[in-house]
Image (tube, grey):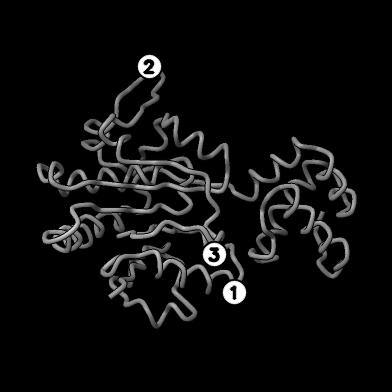
Amino acid sequence: MIIDIKDIGNWSQLKSVITKYVGVDCSQYSDQFLIRRVEVRLRACKLNSLLEYSKILELDMEERQKLNKELTIHVTHFFRDKSLYKTFMGEIVPKLVELKQNGDKAISVWSAGCSTGEEPVSIAICLFEVLGSGLQNMKIQILGTDIDDITIETAKQGLYGEYQFREIPEAYKNKYFRKVDPDGIYVPVEGIRQVITYKKGDILSPFKPKNIDVIFCRNTVIYFNMDAKFQLYSEFFDCLNQGGYLVLGNTEVLIGPAHDKFKLANDKERIYIKE
């Protein structure tokens, strides 16, 4: 089915049902994004009626879970966009270490929309590599949050197949992962797992972590409407320590009031600094 949002009544009702029963606040997302995801489930259910699908969501827990998964779908792997991690290791981490020399000996990173954990693990590996023996003098704290329960539980389990390693240097794979299954299933080593905490969380909720040094929020805000983006970027600014960094996806641009608060640190990698 091709959704016609000129059918305002039934489309508005469906969005209200999704917000209430699926737990995804539709007011924060663009209609274009929602339509694409809902159409997938309408075809799967062989439905042509928005009203009928609303009724199914009200009654069918399994369908709610399937739609939630469709709305929060993630595709990721370790060191996705290798040039970003090269910049993070070569430019950002050394500056953070220098910043911490005479103060708090802790680096705090938030992976907002962490999916199944590949990004937080990649961040941890970068920090371990740059700090080296200096790890004993620096506390690493990485928080990974995602809106989807199943995704967060998968991240906590930390079981990864060969496909997730397609961009990671082989040396890092050998150093920071342990093979637990002959079919090619790996887990991060204990040191990496100890510095990462995973929690369910909606980045659009008012409750956000504070005193963060780096926020990674990549390829997530593209699904939000303009007002939600404006608010989120301003809240990210408030979450960061002075001298902290915001890392966006390479197709995303900082907009709204926060644009005048942040300074561009690296245009190619969409990295901004709070000065």
The residues tagged by marks 3 and 1 sit, at their Cα atoms, a distance apart of 12 Å
Marks 3 and 1 in Cβ contact (< 8 Å) = no
Query: For numbered disc 3, what is the local secondary structure?
Result: helix
Query: Residue 222, which numbered label?
Result: 3
Residue 250, quarter of the rendered image: bottom left
Disc 2 residue type? Pro
**Circle 1 crowding by C-alpha within 10 Å: few under 14, some 14–19, many from 20:** few
Q: Position of residue 179 (x, y in %)?
A: 32, 22
Q: Position of residue 90 (x, y in %)?
A: 18, 58
Q: Nearer the viewer, mark 2 or mark 1?
A: 1
Q: Nearer the viewer, residue 226 or 204?
A: 204
**Circle 3 crowding by C-alpha within 10 Å: few under 14, some 14–19, many from 20:** some
**Number of numbered discs present?**
3
The residues tagged by marks 3 and 2 sit, at their Cα atoms, a distance apart of 39 Å
Query: Residue 239, which numbered label?
Result: none
Marks 2 and 1 in Cβ contact (< 8 Å) = no
3 or 2: tag closer to the N-terminus: 2
Tell me what residue is drawn at x 61 percent, y 69 percent: 225
Disc 3 residue type? Ile
Q: Is residue 160 visible in this depiction of the protein?
A: no
Q: Nearer the viewer, mark 3 or mark 2?
A: 3
Q: Nearer the viewer, mark 3 or mark 1?
A: 1
Q: Quadrant of the C terminus?
A: bottom left
Query: Residue 182, which numbered label?
Result: 2
**Circle 2 crowding by C-alpha within 10 Å: few under 14, some 14–19, many from 20:** few
Q: Residue furthest top?
A: 182
Residue 180, quarter of the rendered image: top left
Disc 1 residue type? Asp
Q: Relative to 72, is 271 above or below?
A: below
Query: Residue 227, which numbered label?
Result: 1
The residues tagged by marks 2 and 1 sit, at their Cα atoms, a distance apart of 49 Å
